Image (cartoon, grey):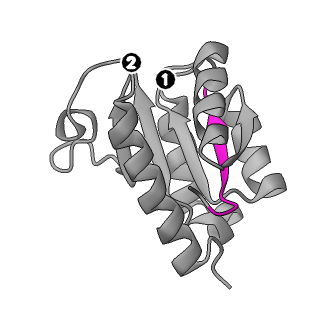
Amino acid sequence: MATSSKVLVIDDDQDFRVSVRSLLESHGYAVVEADSGKDGLRKVVDCEPDIIILDIMMECDSEGYGVNQAIKYQDEYADYRNIPIVMTSAIDLSPDERFPMAGEVDMIRPDYYFTKPLDIPKFLGVMQKAAALAHSHGKRET
């Protein structure tokens, strides 16, 4: 069971948000939802989550990437850089294919990556690791 971990789910698919909320709440997590990257970034600041679940493709092709980049590199979100990010995608690609590390594009990799539909046991295991990481390092740099 999670010990008071707050999870922000950023995804434009309401059905996905509802199912993840139900799953996580049944395992003791508090869940906040955002239906867009813009709303998600606002809620990162307002809610200070311990973990972020972030869909890669929302209303524009790269919105999830943009949210990840903002949190990890923009000064405005510097206090939130240590929040573990779990990215999700309906496109079945490996992390190496999805986040190339050499060549013309150097994508910022999330802390964890899952394709949809989620492998529930693995997902819950990663959520436990992410919660432990968030609580051991503190979610905000001071």
**Quarter of the image where the N terminus is located:** bottom right
Q: Which mark is in front, 1 or 2?
A: 2
Please tell me whether residue 136 is drawn above or below residue 120 in the rendered image: below
Q: In this view, does 76 lie to the left or right of 47?
A: left
CA neighbours of label 2 inside 10 A, class few (<14), some (14 to 19), many (20+): few
Please give the range of residues in magenta.
3-11
The Cα atoms of the two marked residues, 1 and 2, are separated by: 9 Å
> Which amino acid is tagged 2?
Ala
Q: Does 113 appear in magenta? A: no
Residue wearing tag 1: 57
Give the residue at x 65% y 32%: 21
Q: In which quarter of the image is residue 75?
A: bottom right
Q: Where is residue 100 in the image (x, y as percent from the top left)?
A: 21, 42
Instruction: Please give left or right for residue 75 compared with residue 118 in the image.
Output: right
Image spot of residue 40 (x, y percent): 70, 40
Pointers 1 and 2 in contact (C-beta within 8 Å)? yes
